[in-house]
Structure formats: C-alpha cells, structure tokens
Amino acid sequence: GCFADPERAGLDADAVFDGMTEHLFFTLGKLAPTASNHDLYMALSYAVRDRLMTRYLASLEAIRARPHKTVAYLSAEFLIGPQLNSNLLNLGISKEIAEQALRRFRIESLDQILEVEEEPGLGNGGLGRLAACYMESLASLQVPAIGYGIRYEFGIFNQLIRDGWQVEVTDKWLKGGWPWELPQPEEACFVGFGGRTESYTDGKGNYRSRWIPSEHAIGIPHDVPVLGYRVNTCNRLRLWRADATESFDFYAFNIGDYYGAVEEKVGSETLSKVLYPNDGTDEGRRLRLKQQHFFVSCSLQDMLRSLGNRGIPIEEFPNHWTVQLNDTHPAIAVAELMRLLIDEHYLDWDTAWDITTRSVAYTNHTLLPEALEKWDLTRFASLLPRHLELIYEINRRFLQQVRLRYPGNDAIQRKLSIIDEDGGKAVRMANLATIAAHHVNGVAALHSDLLKRQLMPEFAEIWPEKFTNITNGVTPRRWVALANPALSRLLDEHVGPEWITNMELLTKLEERQHDTAFLEQWGATKLSVKRKLAGYIHRQTGVLVDPSSLFDVQVKRIHEYKRQHLNALQVITHYLRIKNGQANGMAPRTVIFGGKAAPGYYMAKLIIRFINGIAETINADPDMEGRLRVVFLPDYNVKLAEQIYPASDLSEQVSTAGKEASGTGNMKFAMNGALTIGTLDGANVEIRERVGPENFFLFGKTETEIMELQTKGYRPRQIVETLPELAEALRLIGLGHFSNGDGELFRPLLDNLTGFDPFFVLADFADYLRAQDEVNQAWTNRKQWNRMSLLNTARTGFFSSDRSIQDYCQTIWKAEPFPVEITC
Ligand code: 26V
C-alpha cells in the first residue's frame, strides 16, 4: 500500500518550500513575512519530518508483516544532538536545495536556520553519544532496531563560566517546542513501585508470588524517527515520559483526598524530570533507581506487547528481540523480564530464565570502581521488593553452580555474589548483568582485556566464551560529512562519495601522501575550518586567536582521570619557556579546552577554575601575543563539538593508562585529520596501531607500569624535586600567579598532586613534555604534518560505528539487515 500522499514527500526545492509554507500557516499559525528564524526552523523541520514518515511507517509495517529480529538498545542516555541537518543529509536534501527553499523566505544560508536549533542534552557524555551513533548506524545498515530511553524534561545542565567558575543552568530544551517527537499516548505503559509481595496458591495448586506496589506511574512513549543514510529504513527511538496515574487519581478524588491525589501526580511526574550527572554523590540516588526501573519496565512491556499483537508466542521472544544493556543503568531488565514472564505471563522459572539469558547482553563502559552501580539493599527492597526476591533466587541458583565448581572457596562466592555483603549490604548491578547476559563486552581492545583479567577474572573463567570486545565507533555522517563539509568535498573528489558508507575506502587517500599540491590543499582545507572556529571563539570569549597557530584541543567531560590538569601544567611550562626566553623554535599555539564538570565534583570544578585562571594570565600578557593563547569554551555539547573536531590540529587524549574505557572523541579528531598526543589507553591503542606509530605522539606509563608504581609506593613529591620546570610551575601556582595573587585558591589541587596524585599526573609529566616537543618539531615541517594528518584520516575508517554495529550484529545480536521497500 501507499503510506502517504507523494506530493508531501518530494525532495526538490519546490516541494520543500511548499511544505514549509503549509506548516508555517497551518501548524505554526504564522504568516511568512513575519516569520522569525525559529519559525522557519520549525517549518523546515516539520516539512522534513513529513518526508521521514513514509519511510518510518514503511519500516514499522515491514516488521509487522514479516517478522525479523529487532535490536532493542536499552540506554538511560541518548545524546542525539541537533536533528535537522542530519535528517536533511540522510534524506538526500542537499544544502543547495534547502537554501533554494529558504531564499524564498529571504534567508540566505541554511546555517542561519541550523543555528537556532536546541539540542536535547539527554546524556552526560561518551556513553549517551555512543548510543546515538549506534542508532544512526543501525538505520543506515538497515537493521531493524528500537532505542529505549527516558525523555528527560531537563537534560544535562547548560554551563556558564562566571569569574572562571562553572555555573549550572537548567536545560529547557523543550521550551520552544521540539518538532522531532511523536507522542503515542495510546501505547502508554503502567509501572509499579514500592509496596510488598505476597504468596498465594493459583488455580492449579501452585505456590506463586505476586507484587502489590504502593505507587504507580504511567510511561507515555515519545517516538523520535531515526533515518538511515539514503535508505528507507527509519527506526524508532522510543523515549518514555512519566505521567501520573489517572485511575488512582479518580479513586483519591472519590474519597475526597484531593491533595493526596495531587501529591501522587507530582511524585510520578518528577520521575522523568531530570537527567542525573554521573558524579558519584549520593544525592538523588533513589530517584535514579526509580527512573531506571521505570523506563526498563515500560520498554520490556512494549516488547512483549508487540509479540502479542503479532500473535507470536512468548517463548519466541529471543528470536524476535535482542536486548542490549548500555552499561548497568538498564540492568534491572534482568529481574523485570523474569517478573513479567513468571508473574504476569505465568511461565515457569526455567523457561523464563532461558528466555532472559538468550535475549540479554551487557556492555561495560567503565572499570572505575566508584562508577560501578551498587544499590543499598534496604533502599532496593523498599522500591522493588519483588525484584529483590527474584534476584535472590537468581543468585541462589548461580552460587550453587559456583560452589560445585569451587568447593569450599568462600572468597570466590563472596566476590561473585550479586549481593555485596562487605559493609552495608548492596545489590551489584554488574554482577546481575554478567550472570544473565549471553555476552559481556568491553568497548575497546585494552578495556575488554582488563575487564576480563582484572575486573571479572572469575566470571571469565566460568564463562570464557561470554566475554568479547567490540571497539566503539562514531558515525561518519555526523562527524565527517555534516561537521566538516570542506573535508567531505575533498574526500568526494579524491576517493569518491562512497566513503560515507564505507570508511575503509579512505585508504585510497594514501596514494596522495607525497603529492605536494594535494597536501597543500589538505592544509588549506583545515585552515579554512580553523578560521570559522576562531570567529566563534572571538564571539564567545572575546579572545582573538590566530587561525594559523597550532590548535591544540582537549574537549570531554572534566574528570581527574582524563587529566585536563596535566594539559594545564603543560601550558604553564610553555608560558614559562616563553617568559624565560627559552622558547626558540616554539610555534604559536592555541590551547582549547571544553567540557562540563559534574555539579558535585569539587576537584573537577576547581580544574575548570584553574584553566580559566591560566587563560586569564596568559591572554593578558603582551609577551604571549602571537605565541600562546588559552581558551576555555563554555557549554561543550554536540553542536559545539561539530565545530571543534574539524578545526583541530592536535587531539589531547591524555588519560591515565587503564582508566578511559575507550574514548570516542579521539576517533572524531583523527578522522578529521588531527594528530593525537596520547597515552596507551582505551581506543588510543588501536588508533595508534592503525595510523602507524610514526603518526601518533605517544607518551606516558603503560597500564602495567602504573600498576607497578602503585604497588611499589608512589611518591609524587620526589618527582617534583627532579623536574625544575614542574617545580617552578607549581611554585607559581602556589604564589597565586594564575589567581590574581590568591595563593590559596588552587591549594587543594596542589596538595592533591604533590600528596597522593591518584591519577599519576606528575609521573607522566616529563614524558608528556617530551612528546609535546615532538609535536612542536613536527608542526614546524608543515608538509610533513599535513602528510601525517592525511594518513590519520586515511587510516581511521575502522572507527566508523558502521563497523562496530556490524561486529555487534555478527557476534552478539545475530541480527541481519532487512531492506524496506516503499510501494507507492
Ligand atoms: C561514571 C562515574 C560515576 C561515579 C563517579 C565517576 C564516574 C566516572 C565515569 C562514569 C561514566 C561511566 C560510563 C561511561 O560513560 N563510560 C564511557 O563510555 C564511553 C562509551 O563507551 C567510553 O568511550 C568512555 O571511555 C567511557 O568513560
């Protein structure tokens, strides 16, 4: 059948103009002559959305008519970024076509319209952005998939910088209306919390347990279409918004408890109110567990319902759904699926466990002990009493197996148990996920190896075949084609436009590595993009930077393990060398930082203040003019990232070895031709292997060396004594040189570094300076630099999320492409 009026699906400028005109008038209630840029953004977005609908409905219908295994990607975060440009690209509406339509509203450039788009900040950083890249690649590879998450009313906070400090501002991304979602109130789901369990005997004389929750919420799906690149597959991102429960309200109204009813309404609505930053503080922990159970329960009910609607028996669940847990945030799915199968669908334990373990797989995204989710047992029991019963039974059966395998080994039981018995009892979500999952994967080769050998050696011994690696990837559509149109044109010319869906083709660029004219064009392209960023920096911060200087960039969440303070110390050394007349041959640099600190993470916020203090002192010093600039760009988000990666020369990936699971920014930089200065951590290891060690600035201790240093006993103060440049930098900081004479301001940072230095900043400092000198040398030979830059782009096709998704499909999901036809 035909899904829509073909008139509404045209991709030419006339059709887009007609669509905009209609939406301006009928949907937005505006007349063209008085329409604002925001009105035109909305009108264009609605016109584009219309053109997604044919493909979206055809994709849904295809699955309904002919069942096919579908990936359910469960994630508490989806950091999807701006939608308009990505949908234009994937549909095949070029910038020229869009601008032809816009000119009829007296708008000259598409950028003016893209500028007003608010991005939904529904994630903290890498984990949420990875989920978004994966949704895009799944659609582009025509794999049926649904992303399940939470429609937070307030996403990650907006960051202001006041007097050098981070200030958090509520993110009201919905305020102007967000045109990309389709609420589906008729598919709402009902979720319980709290209360108690009771046992009863069913009609057949079986003992059963049931849950009588004390509280409920309703999840309303808000669906965001996710279109693949130039294909008909348009998958769904289903985000749940929490609403109050009408039926309970009515009951309370009848007994006259009006305020009690309103209270329940307020209580359940706060569920999807706000995204929590991962700061490890205890604040809001109960609500976070509630959020997790809320979206997981809605999602699993939705999957079961879709089987029911299609008349598919529940035992077939694993053939129709493959459920991926993005970290442990959705790990309650293990217990909730068991509960739904046993309590609501009356399956026996073994059948339910078989279905669950054949469906669920788990991705680990961090080894940091403080980041591994644990829920206080009492709190867990009060919120999810039935789930705790089920977890105890899962645990009892599992520990039985462990005892048979390791008779008399009490230590191993304590370590593998889902329940942590050391200190205050707690539920360990990673253990629950690992026991139930058919696959457990890390996100880069090194990380997966450490996961197996350090974090979970006993689990890996019991189930060696369970553990695997899938190295992260990023979508080349957003991170190259959209973010870097200048580079894309060059790639189209010299490789052919197929690179965009087959990034390995970029190796063809290597043919040009000795072509002087091409290398000059390569450098000129980078320079043109740097000019644009320089303009943005000037508008945002008032700092004038020289586009021909080396753009040295570190953008990512602020965290001690990521070591922005190591970079900051390098900047101070650079400054001191200039001051002391020892800067001969040091090329002009612009050091750019960006990133948010969790609001409760004191040291991270102090690092931001530290960077801004350094920037203030250096940028005001006439001796630094034309030689060194330092910039902290406020409010780093997806939109800003799209401006930054293409304009970077040097990518700072300087985390303590063993601490950064993968990194994905490192890939975006390298694809866009930045060289990396980095440690052997996360995916840096694989980036270096692929681009070649001669095209990567390696420094720092290996993970093994860090471990050795830790066991030997690490004395950071001794390092200071052997490094005069470091000692001088620390002395100046202590004198208040970067804080208007206030010697106390950065004292906690100094004490941290010279006292414990938990992330080995000082241990890696000397080698870092050495590598930075190499960077400077390489930059001085610009032809050679451009060649290295080209080779970085040419050899990083592996880091396309298309490759990651193909890996997941083959090794974990057993899911295949399912092309969608449109029969109009
Ligand atoms: C959470 C917490 C919470 C407690 C305080 C410290 C802390 C630090 C980090 C986290 C995040 C854990 C999960 C996460 O976002 N991991 C990131 O996942 C990316 C995608 O796989 C990966 O590229 C990053 O290396 C990894 O940090």
Image: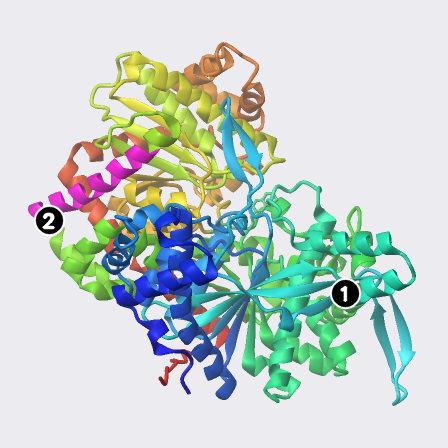
Residue at image coords 47%, 35%? 563
Q: Foreground residue, 556 or 256? A: 256
Q: Is 523 colored magenta in this rendering?
A: yes
Question: Considering only vertical position in the picture, is 527 above or below 375?
Answer: above
Quadrant that contains the C terminus: bottom left
Provide the residue designation for mark 1. Answer: 246
Residue underneath mark 2? 518
Q: Report if the CB atoms under discs 1 and 2 are less than 8 Å apart.
A: no
In the foreground, 462 or 197: 197
Residue range of the region highlighted in magenta in the rendering? 514-536
Q: Secondary structure at mark 1?
A: helix
Q: Is residue 91 above or below residue 156?
A: below
Does the segment drawn in magenta span residue 638? no
Q: Secondary structure at mark 2?
A: helix
**Colour logic:** rainbow
Q: State the residue at coordinates (75%, 72%).
A: 397
Residue 569, percent from left and from top? 42, 25
Q: Amino acid under label 1?
A: Glu
* Residue 80 in view: yes
- 709 with respect to 315 (left or right): left
Numbered label attached to residue 759? none
User: Looking at the picture, does residue 813 appear above or below residue 621?
Assistant: below
